[in-house]
Image (cartoon, helix red, strand yellow):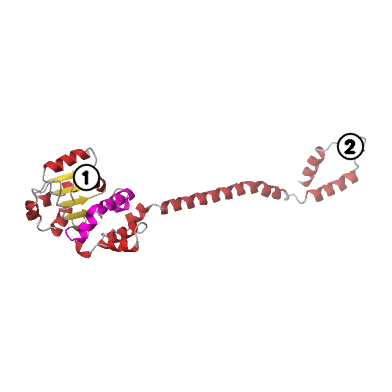
Amino acid sequence: MADDLGDEWWESQPAAAGSPEPSGDEEGRDTEMMQQDTAPVPEPSQETKQVTVTPMECFLTQAKETKEETRKTKKWKKKKISEILAKSEPKPGTPGDLQQLIKDHYSGSRSVIELEELNLPDSCFLKANDLTHSLSSYLKEICPKWVKLRKTHSEKKSVLMLIMCSSAVRALELIRSLTAFKGDAKVMKLFAKHIKVREQVKFLENRVIHLGVGTPGRIKELVKQDGLNLNPLKFLVFDWNWRDQKLRRMMDIPEIRKEVFELLDMGVFSLCKSESLKLGLF
């Protein structure tokens, strides 16, 4: 095989002009030299290694990019609060939760003395829902004398009980679940969807309403336009524990939380301190 390689190598080299033909002895010596030259044939494996270096480097680069993309995906998943809440057990709201939210909301705009004045007395809080109640059963527990109370209510532009929630759709769900509790009481929708403020003001002026269910934004607007008087109000119930499709409670939504505190500033704090108004967390 070495002879064959030697012949091929020689065939590929042009003979020098005027060079004499090699003799037999010279051919033998040349053949030996060729065998020595061709002995380390495995050397091309280094070239093979060099050729394979490039795809190896490309592969490693792709792997790094994949790790970076995976790392970014993991970071994005960590920011999804809904996934964490979906796996955790729901905890019922407590009066302390509301007190802490009040403190956090006003801490940047009120002095220490003013913040102390915003502390609500424990006596103004009703028993909170422990997540075992329907709305009707919860209201029956916190207001066992509802029938007698609604019969004595005759003041227009007011309600005895307000139930605040995060949206019009949720308000309709709550109204449907009030059947076992309300009896002959008149219930009014207090939200903005398809209902104008002036229509609600006129309705409150002409009729006696016992119970209102709606959003804090619309309730606040009715109070501002003197369409709703809060003084006769006896119960203010927060739809505290219910979560929407994104697993947010009503007080987790910034715009809803802002409107709630604006409403509380419109006389609710003073009514709670006078103990004429009770707060419930459903």
Q: Position of residue 195 (x, y in %)?
A: 21, 38
Among the 4 quarters of the image, the one containing residue 20: top right
Q: Residues within 10 Å of mark 2 (few under 14, many from 20)?
A: few
The residue lying furthest to the top in this view is 17
Q: What residue does disc 2 label?
A: 16
Residue 132 visible in rendering: no
**In the depicted view, which residue is nearer to us: 240 or 14?**
240
Q: What residue does disc 1 label?
A: 222
Total numbered circles: 2
**In the depicted view, which residue is nearer to us: 169 or 224?**
224
Magenta residues span 248-276
Q: Position of residue 94 (x, y in %)?
A: 25, 61
| Quadrant the C terminus occupies | bottom left
Q: Position of residue 257 (x, y in %)?
A: 30, 52
Amino acid found under the numbered disc labelled 1: Leu
**In the depicted view, which residue is nearer to us: 46 or 3?**
46
| Dot 2: element | loop
